[in-house]
Image (cartoon, rainbow, N blue to C red):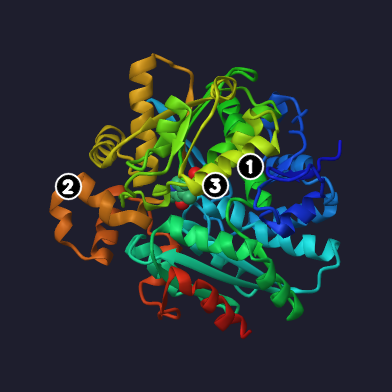
Amino acid sequence: MEIRYKSTRGDGTLISASQAVLQGLAPDGGLYVPDSIPALETPLEALAEMEYKQIAFLVMSKFLSDYTEEELRECVEKAYDSKFDTGLIAPVVKKGQAHYMELFHGATIAFKDMALSILPHLLTTAARKNQITDEIVILTATSGDTGKAALAGFADVPGTRIIVFYPKGGVSRIQELQMITQKGDNTFVAGVHGNFDDAQTGVKKMFGDQALKDELAGKGFRFSSANSINIGRLVPQVAYYVWAYSRLVKEGTIKAGEKINFVVPTGNFGNILAGYYAKLMGIPVNKLVCASNDNKVLYDFFKTGIYNRNREFILTSSPSMDILISSNLERLIYKVCGHSAEQNRQYMADLNQKGVYTLNINQIAGLTDFVPGYADEAACAEEIRTVYEECGYIIDPHTSVASAVYRNYRKETGDETPAVIVSTASPYKFSRSVMTAIDSKYSEMEDFALISELNKVSGVPVPAAIREIMDAAIRHDHVCEIDGMVQEVRGFLGV
Ligand SMILES: *Cc1c(COP(=O)(O)O)cnc(C)c1O
């Protein structure tokens, strides 16, 4: 069955998968969604015998209908190779009461690598298929991890340039160093005086600026997005939910057909939405537990049906979840509105103008696959310490938010369905928060000293991604105001 894509705010016009990948965001400001969710069809028992790459190919071939088998196989081969430090790509490990799916074994040690190591290939293939000769300009706002993963994915990819904006002061020092030391003549990084939502809104504005796009098109440039609004990021993420299920079958934790829970540390709602798509494809999922940090806009939304971003933006130790406007939620909203672009448009306009919208009773009834939870800073630190003391296993603050939420969920509901906690970053990326959570004595130490302490305490080798930045030269020192983002883009493109 051929899957085509339409905008959550549009008139129902359908485009091919490769066109949707090229566009990123729809011209009307909406997000592309598949016109139906394809069924997995492969028997669940058979999945248990597959490798990661086979599952990735299988899932993507269902969604990306106009890519040939050969094209997709090539994309998968190029993406999931020795950039990952384990042939398993995404190990699923049992610790204490839960399984942790480690999605941080790629080049930049955060889960964004799972999709961003393949997106450049999906995108350049899409350009070729659609006879696009313009240079593709990837424009990205990052809460910390997307930026580096996108830079690593696109650096020196012919026919592309990549521009990343991050909130100055809103990311960890390691995250910032990873970005500002990025090599590649086609890369550009700037800090923005503002928070992630400001940076994301600035980027979305440029995508929506037709005059700017026309002007750039005249000069041979074409914008695309590496943010999780691009279906080229969402679809590869569906694969690891299928993979996690297959691992639990393989090791005998469940029999094929039995349900599992997923617990997902959530910010922009891209990761957990991919889990929902896996469920809709036919993976037996009981609940998707949506874990938030102190910026618990999603928790409140799932509890009440009211999405309200009018609140203080809190900087936490899990910066990649410091988000008040979860872009990908729009795809779920559209679905629970019975695929009404009109209703969705209204809600998104309300969000934009008043900062709040309220679902009706019928729409709220469409949210039951999700269970919300949140962990504040103290609970997050305590969970890091507890998991370390109980299992000798060290988790990063994002994973810890999910782990704490799961501990609480299990206690409150008694739900003993086997659970997979989606582990989104290596603790090395957040060594300061992690080490001080384990013992306050570490708060005096320098960042790099903490890395060797973490190495001693965990026994896990220091990843290449960290070793690289220890003495790398800083190559990007641009800082701008929100109003100045367009000027930065113009400057880098020379227009
Ligand atoms: C991006 C990110 C998240 C949040 O994922 P979303 O898809 O934005 O919900 C969680 N943890 C880490 C480490 C991340 O990089």
**Rendered view: 427 above or below 338:** below
Q: Report if the beta carbon of the residue with label 3 is closer than 8 angstroms to ligand 1.
A: no
Residue hosting label 2: 439
Secondary structure beneath label 3 = loop
Secondary structure beneath label 1 = helix
Q: Residue at x 24, y 36 (%)?
A: 389
Q: Earlier in the sequence, mark 3 or mark 1?
A: 3
**Rendered view: 161 above or below 271:** below
Residue lying furthest top: 414
Q: Amino acid at mark 1?
A: Arg
Q: Amino acid at mark 2?
A: Asp
Q: Amino acid at mark 3?
A: Ser
**Rendered view: 165 above or below 313:** below
Report x, y in % for residue 463: 42, 59
User: Residue 327: which numbered mark, if any?
Assistant: 3
Q: Residue at x 44, y 75 (%)?
A: 181
Q: Report if the beta carbon of the residue with label 2 is closer than 8 angstroms to ligand 1.
A: no
- Tell me if label 2 and label 1 are in contact, CB under 8 Å: no
Spatial CA span between label 3 and label 2:
36 Å
Report x, y in % for residue 150: 56, 63
Asked whether the viewer can see residue 158, the reply is no
Asked whether the viewer can see residue 267, the reply is yes
Q: Residues within 10 Å of mark 2 (few under 14, many from 20)?
A: few
Q: Residue at x 86, y 35 (%)?
A: 1
User: Residue 345: which numbered mark, if any?
Assistant: 1
